Image (cartoon, rainbow, N blue to C red):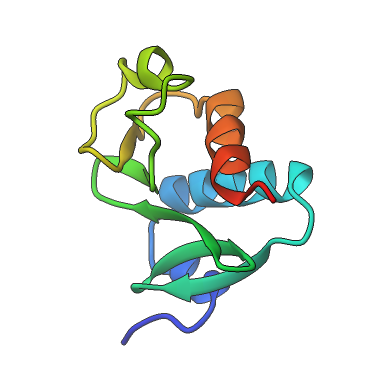
Amino acid sequence: MKPATIKQYFASFDTLQQSLLQQIHDIVHSEISGGEDCISYSIACIRKGRKRFYYAAFKDHISIYPAPRNHTDFVELLKPFKGGKGTVQLPLDQPLPDQIILRIARHILSD
């Protein structure tokens, strides 16, 4: 069954993934006002108007979408992280890079 809420989405994962998803949620909401939680494409999303910041848990990592990998402010910053053109993969066995997550969220959700 597809999750209808962020709470349901988080609950579908083990404790470590739940904790990391909650940390990302809290990091973004602590600095970005007006963001609304939602589920989109069956993953966690924070939306602000028409803009969307997505984050999802997987077996070995947490992904953030869309990742501004080609934006000049992010090319070097995101090099150490795996991911495709539009994603950043954050390994489960490493601390979350709070400031990088926040910079990506600000970039995506800025007015």
Position of 4 relative to 85 (above/below): below
Q: How far from the left and from the top, in percent, is residue 64? A: 40, 45
Outermost residue on the left side: it is 84
Q: Which residue is at 31% across, 23% downward?
A: 81
Asked where in the image residue 89 lies, by quadrant, the reply is top left
Q: How far from the left and from the top, in percent, is residue 84? A: 20, 38
Indicate left or right for 34 with 22 as reference: right
Q: How far from the left and from the top, in percent, is residue 75? A: 36, 19
Indicate left or right for 93 with 33 as reference: left
Q: Which residue is at 56% across, 68% downward?
A: 50
Outermost residue on the top side: it is 76
Q: How far from the left and from the top, in percent, is residue 14? A: 39, 56
Position of 18 relative to 50 (above/below): above
Q: Which residue is at 69% across, 51% downward?
A: 111
Asked where in the image residue 82 lies, by quadrant, the reply is top left
Q: How many marks?
A: 0
Asked where in the image residue 34 lies, by quadrant, the reply is bottom right
User: Which quadrant: the N terminus?
Assistant: bottom left
Q: Which residue is at 50% across, 44% downward?
A: 20
Q: Relative to the observer, which residue lies in front, 42 or 14?
A: 42
